[in-house]
Amino acid sequence: MERLSIGKLPERLLKELVLSGIGKRRPEVLLGAAVGEDCAALMLEEGEAFVLSTDPITACEKEIGSLAIQVTLNDLATTGCEPLGVLLTVLLPPGTGSMELGKLMEDAERTCAENQVEILGGHTEVSDAVNRILVNVCGVGKVKREELIRGTEIRGQKDLVATKWIGLEGTVLMAREKGTELEERFSKEAVSEALHLSRFLSVLPEARIAAKNGALAMHDVTEGGILGALWELAEAGNCGITAELSAIPLREDTRKFCDCFGLDPYRLISSGCMLIAAPDGRALTESLRAAHIPAALIGKTTDTKERLLIVNGKPVPLEPPAADEIYKIV
C-alpha cells in the first residue's frame, strides 16, 4: 500500500483512487469531475432553483465517505429538493495509505449511486494541518421555486413529528469507534445490530412524504440532538415550541450505550431522525407509517416565544444547543 506525501494528490493517484470510480448519472451535469477542471456546471429548467448545503465530518473515521455524503443529502432534503450532486474536499494527514483514500471514495460513490447523485468534483490533498481524515461535502439540489420548504413559514400552532428514533447516528458512531469497550458490557450481537442502524441514516424517504403532506418546515436532527433541533427549528420559524420528552422516540440500545459512556441521548447527534412541522401531524404520521417509516407526534409550535420541554408533567425551559455529546468520547 502506497503512503501519501504532503501536497496535492499526484495526477496518477487522482485518476486511480478518486476519479476512476465516479459514475455519470445526472443529465443536469454539464461539467463534472475531471483532471484540470476547477469547477462544475449544472443546468436548471425554467422555474427551478438551486439548493446548496455544506457540512464537514469530524467525529469519525470509519466509513467517513458514506456518512459525509448522507449527512449532506439529508440537509438538502429538508427543503423538499431533489439532490443532484456533491463537491468533495478531502484532507488527509501525511502517511495516509492509498487504500484508505480508495475505500473512502468507494464508500462515497456507493452512497451517491444509492441516491442517484453524482460526485461533481472537489479537491484532495495531503496536509499536516490535519491529524486525521477530514471530509467536507458541498451538496447541490434542485426544486421548483413554489415547492421550496423554508423554516420561516411556520405560523400558529403546528404539529411536530419526529421520524424513526433519536440518537441513531450517535449509536452507530459509538459502535464503530468504541465497539471493543461496548462488547465488554453488551453482546457482540448487540454491537453488530447497532452498526447496522446505519441503514436508517437517510431521511430522503420521509422528506418526500412530508413534502407531499404539506410540511411547513423540516430539520435534520444532527449535532446537538433532538433538543438542539427543537431549538433551531423554533429559531428558524421565530416561534415557540412545546414538546413532550416521553413522546420522543428513543431506542433501548441507544439509551443503554449512552448510559455506558455517561451521555445524554437527547443531545446526541441524530442523523436519520427528521423533525417536521406540519398542519396535520396525525395524517403525516399515518402516511409515514404506511411507508414503513416509524414516526411520532412529539409536540406543537406556538405563537408565543416560549420554548418548553415537558418532563414528568412539568415544563422545563429549552436551552440553546451546546457541544454534541458524541465529542465526549471521540
Image (spheres, rainbow, N blue to C red):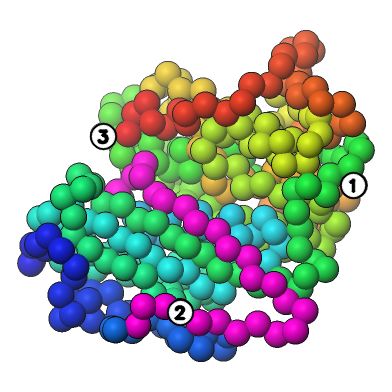
To which quarter of the image does residue 74 belong? Answer: bottom right
Q: Nearer the viewer, mark 2 or mark 1?
A: 2
Label annotation for residue 180: 3
Q: Secondary structure at mark 2?
A: loop
Q: Nearer the viewer, mark 2 or mark 3?
A: 2
- For the N terminus, give its image quadrant: bottom left
The residue pinned by badge 2 equals: 40
Q: CA distance from mark 2 to mark 1?
A: 39 Å
Which tag, 2 or 3, sits closer to the chain's start? 2
- Counting from the top left corner in percent of width and height, residue 322 is at 52, 26
Q: Residue at x 47, y 62 (%)?
A: 138
Position of 268 compared to 208: left or right?
left
- Counting from the top left corner in percent of width and height, residue 175 is at 37, 39
To which quarter of the image does residue 299 belong? Answer: top right
Which tag, 3 or 1, sits closer to the chain's start? 3
Q: Residue at x 70, y 85 (%)?
A: 45
Label annotation for residue 279: 1
Q: CA distance from mark 3 to mark 1?
A: 45 Å
Q: Is 267 one of the magenta-colored residues?
A: no
Tell me the magenta residue range.
37-61
Q: CA distance from mark 2 to mark 3?
A: 42 Å
Q: Amino acid at mark 2?
A: Ala
Residue 292 appearing in the image:
no
Q: Residue at x 49, y 48 (%)?
A: 197
Q: Is residue 26 above or below residue 259?
A: below
- Counting from the top left corner in percent of width and height, residue 174 is at 38, 36
Which tag, 2 or 1, sits closer to the chain's start? 2
Q: Residue at x 54, y 42 (%)?
A: 222
Q: Nearer the viewer, mark 3 or mark 1?
A: 1
